[in-house]
Image (cartoon, rainbow, N blue to C red):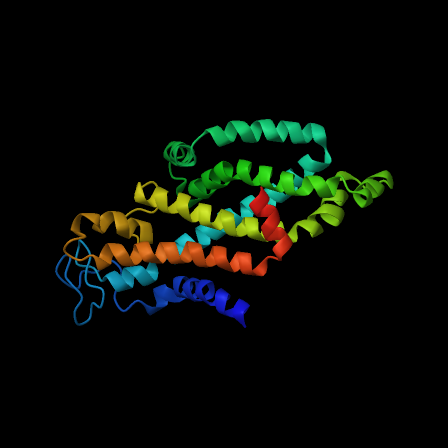
Amino acid sequence: MRTVLRLVPAGLIAAIALVGPLLAPHAIDAPVAAPYALPGPGVPLGADELGRDVLSRLLAGGRDLLLTSLAVACAVTVAAAALGTAAALRPALGRLVERLADLMILLPAVLAVLLVVLSWRGGGRVALVTAAVVVSLPYAVRMVAGAAAPIAGSGYVEAAAAGGERLPQLIWREVLPNLRATLLVLLGLRFVAAVYVVTTAAFLEVGPEPPAADWALMVRENAPGILLNPWAVVVPSLAIGVLALSVQAAAEVLAPRPGRRAVTRL
């Protein structure tokens, strides 16, 4: 019962983000009140800089953020699982992956995303997802390689290798089944990191563009009027924080304790 209760916030915020566009009482780009109007009849959270309903834009602004961050987290976790496990099983490949990861980690994530998105004209969310995956992968590979190293050196894996199993078989059959907990926690961590990267890109206006409804874009657009209608900034900011923290908490709840301790040690 306690586990179910800890999963409720993530499920609730995800459901709101996915079905929110269907529940919006007004069009996201139609002015319905004076700019920065305070909450009142028909506009429970007031209006934004152009007089658009904040509640409607809030309901419509989470789906793309959720799906984009989830796509980034899944892609990074899958790629890191394959590369990190292969690096643990093959020392020469592990040294090469380690050097490349060290070089990539030196480049700030936000700067790398800006370089890719600004140089990939018309790339849109594809460019943003690609850049977020590339900058997130080195850390994830190092994490998986560290967790897989003790397993790769265990007797049953060496026996399987001596028995003729090839590298893909060793990864899929022998090592990855023992990394389920670590990968689940990693997925949660990468989701939080993806939310950070995607929202930062939106805040810098290199992701979704106006008049799209996006939580990070709402914060940027309405920041100048925060003293007039603070709800237009506070509510989307809270939504981003609750989304990231609740998904991370859900991943930790679902992961067995040994997996959590392994990630903590790394």
Q: Quadrant of residue 229?
A: bottom left
User: Where in the figure is residue 184, as x and y percent of width and height?
Assistant: 58, 53
User: Where in the figure is residue 173, as x and y percent of width and height?
Assistant: 75, 49
Residue 214 visible (yes or no):
no
Q: Quadrant of residue 197?
A: top left
**Number of numbered callouts drawn:** 0
Q: Front-most of 33 and 190?
A: 190
Residue 233 visible (yes or no):
yes
Q: Front-most of 168 and 27?
A: 168
Quarter the C terminus occupies: top right
User: Where in the figure is residue 116, as x and y percent of width and height?
Assistant: 42, 34
Residue drawn at 20 percent across, 57 percent down: 230
Q: Is residue 104 above or below residue 202?
A: above
Q: Front-most of 119 and 87?
A: 87
Residue drawn at 30 percent across, 67 percent down: 24
Residue drawn at 16 percent across, 51 percent down: 225
Quarter the N terminus occupies: bottom right
**In this picture, residue 214 sits left or right of residue 258:** left
